[in-house]
Image: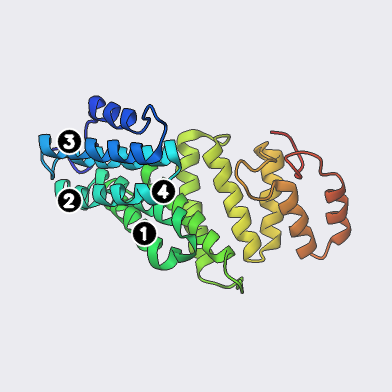
């Protein structure tokens, strides 16, 4: 049994069995589901239902249904089973269980993002809490949980009909993203896509909070200091953020001139 800070070894044969089952010769989803279920059942029969191997089989099953078939709904029962088994096999305060909690949170958010507060957030927060206790606040996996939770909180706020710039959701997301940025940048450097993405998240949160001076500063830093004028995600690029900030600062002429010059990044300035 691995220590709480360690990860369990992965059985290559179990992974291969799940991968093969997920890609049946007839290329049919119902066939893949039946084959995957059969593999999971055989693993449980051989190693025991409450075994490390059964945790892996359930996890691999969920991952395969997402990667090969994009079926988060079918993956969810497998990943929820992997989580329940992880709590039994490893205990809740374990690095492996934190991954299982995070997996279920990801699936829930994909399936019903509008239910984030009730359905996904408790698990996302639990994954973060476990990692803080087991691995420490400055571990990369802890920072990963912080980034996930910050981005989901911001997305949940953005989806509200009446968005309030003074919502407590925004400073919470900002603080999580700030700490994650420090850890990620220390490990990966300023040009890594996760680091750049976290900087963009912070700029979007600042814009939501109507802190236009900060948005101007962050967007200029992205363009000139970090040479990351293009958003690696789906959000606005640095030039678009800067234009919004300039309007918020009552400088519409500058915003219009900037927008007239936008010709890259699918609308933003700069180059990838």
Determine which residue is flagged by label 4.
72
Of mark 3 and mark 1, the one earlier in the sequence is 3
Q: Secondary structure at mark 2?
A: loop
Front-most of residues 185 and 155: 155
Q: Is residue 204 left or right of residue 110?
A: right
Determine which residue is flagged by label 2.
91
Front-most of residues 252 and 78: 78
Of mark 4 and mark 2, the one earlier in the sequence is 4
Please give the label number shown on residue 125.
1
Q: Which image quarter holds the C terminus?
A: top right
Measured Cα–Cα span from mark 2 to mark 1: 17 Å
Q: Residue 172, percent across and down?
A: 48, 63
Other-residue count near label 4 (Cα within 10 Å), few / some / many at <14 / 14–19 / ≥20 = many
Other-residue count near label 3 (Cα within 10 Å), few / some / many at <14 / 14–19 / ≥20 = many
Residue at left 40%, top 56%?
Answer: 108
Measured Cα–Cα span from mark 4 to mark 3: 22 Å
Residue 137 visible in the shown view:
no
Q: Is residue 211 left or right of residue 239?
A: left
Q: Which image quarter holds the N terminus?
A: top left
Reply above or below: 60 against 127.
Answer: above
Label 3 with label 2: CB-CB less than 8 Å: no
Determine which residue is flagged by label 3.
43
């Amino acid at each position: 049994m691995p220590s709480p800070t360690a990860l369990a070894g992965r059985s290559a044969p179990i992974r291969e069995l799940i991968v093969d089952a997920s890609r049946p010769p007839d290329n049919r989803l119902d066939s893949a589901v039946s084959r995957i279920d059969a593999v999971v059942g055989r693993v449980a029969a051989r190693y025991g239902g409450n075994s490390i191997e059964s945790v892996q089989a359930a996890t691999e099953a969920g991952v395969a249904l997402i990667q090969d078939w994009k079926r988060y709904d079918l993956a969810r029962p497998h990943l929820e089973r992997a989580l329940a088994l992880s709590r039994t096999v490893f205990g809740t305060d374990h690095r492996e269980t934190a991954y299982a909690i995070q997996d279920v949170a990801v699936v829930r958010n994909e399936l019903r993002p509008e239910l984030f507060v009730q359905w996904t957030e408790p698990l996302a927060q639990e994954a973060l809490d476990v990692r803080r206790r087991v691995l420490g606040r400055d571990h990369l996996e802890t920072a990963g949980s912080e980034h996930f939770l910050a981005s989901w909180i911001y997305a949940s706020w953005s989806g509200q009909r009446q968005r309030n710039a003074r919502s407590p959701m925004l400073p919470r997301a900002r603080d999580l993203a700030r700490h994650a940025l420090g850890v990620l940048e220390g490990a990966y450097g300023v040009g890594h896509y996760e680091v750049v993405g976290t900087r963009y998240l912070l700029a979007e949160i600042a814009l939501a909070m109507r802190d236009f001076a900060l948005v101007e500063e962050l967007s200029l830093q992205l363009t000139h200091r970090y040479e990351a004028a293009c958003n690696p995600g789906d959000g606005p690029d640095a030039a678009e953020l800067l234009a919004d900030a300039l309007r918020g600062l009552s400088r519409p002429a500058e915003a219009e001139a900037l927008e007239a010059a936008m010709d890259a990044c699918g609308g933003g300035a700069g180059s990838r």
